[in-house]
Amino acid sequence: MMRKRFYNAIFASGIGFILTCMMVGISLNTEGTTLKVEGASAAQWTWIGIGISLVFLSQLFAGQVDAFLGAVPKPQLSKLLPEEGKRAMLKPWLLAALLVVMLVWPFMVSRGSVDLATLTLIYIMLGLGLNIVVGLAGLLDLGFVAFYAVGAYTYALLSQYFGMSFWACLPLSAGLAALFGFLLGFPVLRLRGDYLAIVTLGFGEIIRILLNNWTSVTGGPSGISGIAKPSLFGLEFTRRAKEEGATTFHEFFGIDYSSSYKVIFLYLIAVILVCFVIYVINRLMRMPIGRAWEALREDEIACRSLGLNRTMIKLSAFTIGASTAGFAGAFFSARQGFISPESFIFIESAIILAIVVLGGMGSQVGVILAAIVMTILPELAREFSEYRMLLFGLLMVVMMRWRPEGLVPMKRPHLELKT
Amino acid sequence: MTETSLYVIQQLINGLTIGSTYALIAIGYTMVYGIIGMINFAHGEIYMIGSYISFIVIAGLLGMGFISLPVILIVALIVAVVIASTYGWTIERVAYRPLRGSNRLIPLISAIGMSIFLQNYVALSQSSRDVALPPQITGGWTFGDPSVFEVSFSYMQLLIWSATLLVMVLLTLFISRSRMGRACRACSEDLGMTNLLGIDTNRIIALTFIVGAALAAIAGLLLGLYYGVVNPYIGFIAGLKAFTAAVLGGIGSIPGAMLGGLILGVTEAMTSAFFPSEYKDVVSFGLLVLILLFRPSGILGKPEVEKV
């Protein structure tokens, strides 16, 4: 037994050496026109050595490691929560307290953190939207960023060419993104899960390529700049009003101009949008359509034999998910003031997917927590920022292997008969 | 001959060249899909790693003063194939085998994670910029009237054609004649039954990953020499194209993948001949959508029956 494990460990470390020696141990460098090969520094070789010895030891003591991990109790998050009855009583108060904190908090901290919070809220919106498609309906969409792009470009173009305001464009952006979702979904939703994933991925790429090349309308790779910011009932957040006769926010209230009002205002809009999205999704989940999504995810054949219209159900999930992304997109372009196809690459879709997967597919609380973690952690650990995507990828693999249900697994709203 | 027809012939040559490398990558997708029914999303990254390894070997040998080109290429081929296969095997062992038997989406998400991981691993350990290798194989033949349009067929293109042909013949012989090949075919027919009959299916699955990775590494070497440029992000789009080729030919069918790769390559070359070349990706993804809609089983594939 020990002997077999020893051979196993030697084999594993040998594989580890083959994998790392050429990639990490040797690097390619261009000098003038010739390509030079350079050995890695001593520090890098030390890291390779450490990695390989870790692999060796973990394989050698695999049995003990497994026993140790098995002995560690799994965190029972649900035990931490108070009882069902108490929770139902506490819930409205907690939500109200949370809302108050969310509204008061930005006035007390720096501009940078409010801005970061706004970005987090955008990712929460995107995560919630994708959660409908992937988590509830079980359709893997790898081109979600396409709908985000449609929403963003809708607002940018309408405001650029027709001078329409943010508030008028918001429903239009969501509607157009939903239309795109409908048009794409109608033919492809008949496909099986993994084909669907690839087709949506291709669709995302097509949208990006079109945006990049349709230079006369979208400005091509240089994007659209100078997108108007949202206003509060016609009050602008600039130092001076753009048009003659219009008043700005600080003039109207007779306070000194400060650029942080605009940031806080954007943050508040994001909070309202996120609350709206959460509310709508929660309502939908309790409706027959929401239950049908989950039923379809669990067993498609059973659903069909019960007479559910598979295409309509999938299509509704796809369309509603897309419209959420459209919302987020319109808000994103209003916040940035500048958009280009660079913001809508595949990696962005992968990040949103990672948020949903880490949070727990289907679980709203999980998705929100994951979005917060995923946007704030890279900001906190800036020196590791180049390792960010590497860790994202690794995390996705590790989560699928050990905790495929996510950090906060989904709980269906249900009633229990008490005896 | 007129200018247009010569131009079309030139694009046909270019298209078949690119298409044969797509076919090599597509075989990896199709073999894995045929046996365990999952899309190995990280397969494109294996191609990219194969390209990198062969660049490292070629540049290293040139730097050490070797001049014999065939020796350099053969050494590069062997090293790239060995290392890429090791990557393929490890990916299967680490990221897919523990997930076997779970919901379809779970291995796919794990594969996407693996793909992102490998991309960034190479970008960090090498560099995220383009690495260029000066052309090693130069020269070729030209046909046609120089005053109208000259069709050129380079030695590099000849190498790609003949290498692909050789690999395809060897693979077909391996699948149809050898014991392992027979086991592979049995596994794609019915995995559970094959297991019952005393064949170690885990080994056969690992073997398909190794073979697929080896073919991707060969494609990596050939395309690396052809384009002369490599960066950590080439695997994504190449993988997507190869997957399209596999679906076009009928996923699960090896001759289908070969055919699909060639058709896709020629279609792309023709598109970029008459439209701006940025739209060639749009055309190939559009093609993918159309095939999936109207003939999901592809040209040579068997229609899939849904089992309860």
Image (cartoon, coloured by chain):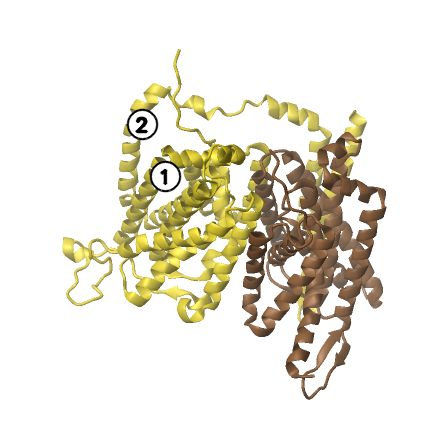
Chain colours: A yellow, B brown
Q: Give the residue pinned by disc 2.
A: A91
Q: Give the residue pinned by disc 1.
A: A281
Q: State which quarter of the image contains the N terminus of chain A.
A: top right
Q: Position of residue A200 (x, y in %)?
A: 51, 51
Q: Residue at x 57, y 42 (%)?
A: B109
Q: Earlier in the sequence, mark 1 or mark 2?
A: 2
Q: Position of residue A215 (x, y in %)?
A: 44, 70
Q: Residue at x 71, y 52 (%)?
A: B27
Q: Position of residue A17 (x, y in %)?
A: 74, 45
> Which residue is more in the foreground, A47 or B58?
B58
Chain that bears disc 2? A
Q: Position of residue A55 (x, y in %)?
A: 70, 37
Q: Is residue A365 visible?
A: no
Q: Residue at x 76, y 48 (%)?
A: B211
Q: Is residue A313 visible?
A: yes
> Which residue is more in the foreground, A145 or A119?
A145
Q: State which quarter of the image contains the C terminus of chain A.
A: top left
